[in-house]
Image (cartoon, grey):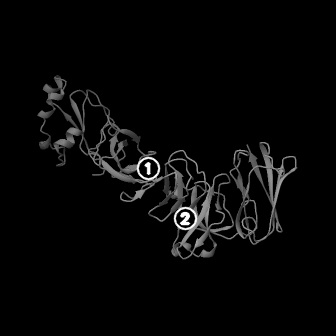
Amino acid sequence: MNRNLFAVIFLSAFFARAGFAADYQYQINWRAMDLGGGIRSSASELQDSLVWGPVKKSQNAWYALQPGFVFVKTVSLSTPAVQSATHPDQVNEYADASPVFTVAEAGGYADIAGYRYIFDQSSGTIPTYLTALYAPAGTSISLSDKPDGAWYLHAAAEDYEGIQGAFTAHYKVNIKTAVVPASSGTYITGSGARVDIPAGAVEAQTNISIMQPAESQIPRGVYDPNLTGFVGPVEEIKFTSPAELLDDVIITLPYTHAQLNGIDENTLVLTQYDATIRSWRPVVGSAPDKTANKVAGTVGHFSLFRIAGYNPVSVNAVDLSNYPNPFTAGAGGATKIRYSLSGNANVEIKIYDLLGNLVWKKTISAGEFPGGATGPNEIPWDGKNWKGRYVSAGGYICVVKTGGGAQKTKIGVK
């Protein structure tokens, strides 16, 4: 049945005069009642759908019920359809501790106002008006920072009369994050993504999450012309609670030959999404292991990671940047100046203050790594000038010069 069938039943004068108290509702023989056209319904469906009261206006049939009438909805709401972009499979384990769900009425009924839902670790919980939360139809259900284990979203539809459907959907998610000890730790996901955290890289035990975000959740960055294409899915790696890396970690992602799609395997690098310039950047020193079909790189912070083909043509504004920016000088901090070379080259890096005074410079010979070698390079600056003293807070200009030209970027010191 594609729509709800409604009936208005006139009660006898005896019941009407008595105000039709609830005590009399069981005197109606629901099972024997013919609602027209030979349609009958079970007692439970009818009793669950009663709307009592002297006057009730229906959202579906625009009339008011008079005293002595009962409004009966004879079609129960069906079991909702639940989906999760973050946890699409109810069997697999996911490191994402913040699941997101969409709930829809399987039958597509137009009078669904929303859904009552509960998220717990029991498989058969039934949400009720008193115990459950409410989500309007068409909105997603988002939860955050849930502990490891099997969890269930229980959802039931509710119509505009406040009547809840008799059928509940139970959607299971399995959350399993990695507990990283302060000494060291290695975490490998089912897809083969791997994080190696050395001793002392974190201050205390904490959890990391490795997940593959949905396509709609991947940021659209500035296109880097040196990238020849992406290989495999995006992996989002993050702490599930506030924490910082105290040392570099190694990220390793797998790939298959089918995913290359014409990209030269020798050009594969690990890329990291840089939110400061809204672009995917190659991780310095990353390279493919063609025997194991993996690409590994060393990074100083978590982010979004993906394998890509990389064929730099020159040092350009897209490739030249620094991270972090701004950074704190004098507290053991440093910024990393990043750029790419199309071939081995002599490189000169100069940093000026905003008045044009030279603050710091470094020269690197062709072929020297890092700094003068083909591909991505990364040079640290700790915020000291050529006299070995920390510079003042403010803005500075970094110039990277090769035989093919020069590029500039801004560096902030705080």
Residue 279: percent from the left, percent from the top? Answer: 65, 58
The quarter holding residue 20 reads top left
Residue 353: percent from the left, percent from the top? Answer: 83, 48
The quarter holding residue 290 reads bottom right
Q: Is residue 349 left or right of residue 238?
A: right
Q: Mark 2: which amino acid?
A: Thr
Residue 390: percent from the left, percent from the top? Answer: 78, 46
Query: In front here: 294 or 75?
Result: 294
The tag on residue 254 is none
Mark with earlier residue (2, 1): 1
For label 1, the residue is 99
The tag on residue 252 is 2
- Count the marks: 2
Q: Do the residues labelled 2 and 1 touch (CB within 8 Å)?
A: no
The residue tagged with tag 2: helix, strand or loop? strand
Structural distance between the alpha carbons of marks 2 and 1: 25 Å
Image quadrant where one finds the C terminus: top right
Specify few, some or many for label 2: CA neighbours under 10 Å numbering under 14, 14-19, or 20 or more. Answer: many
For residue 333, above or below residue 313 = above
Specify few, some or many for label 1: CA neighbours under 10 Å numbering under 14, 14-19, or 20 or more. Answer: many
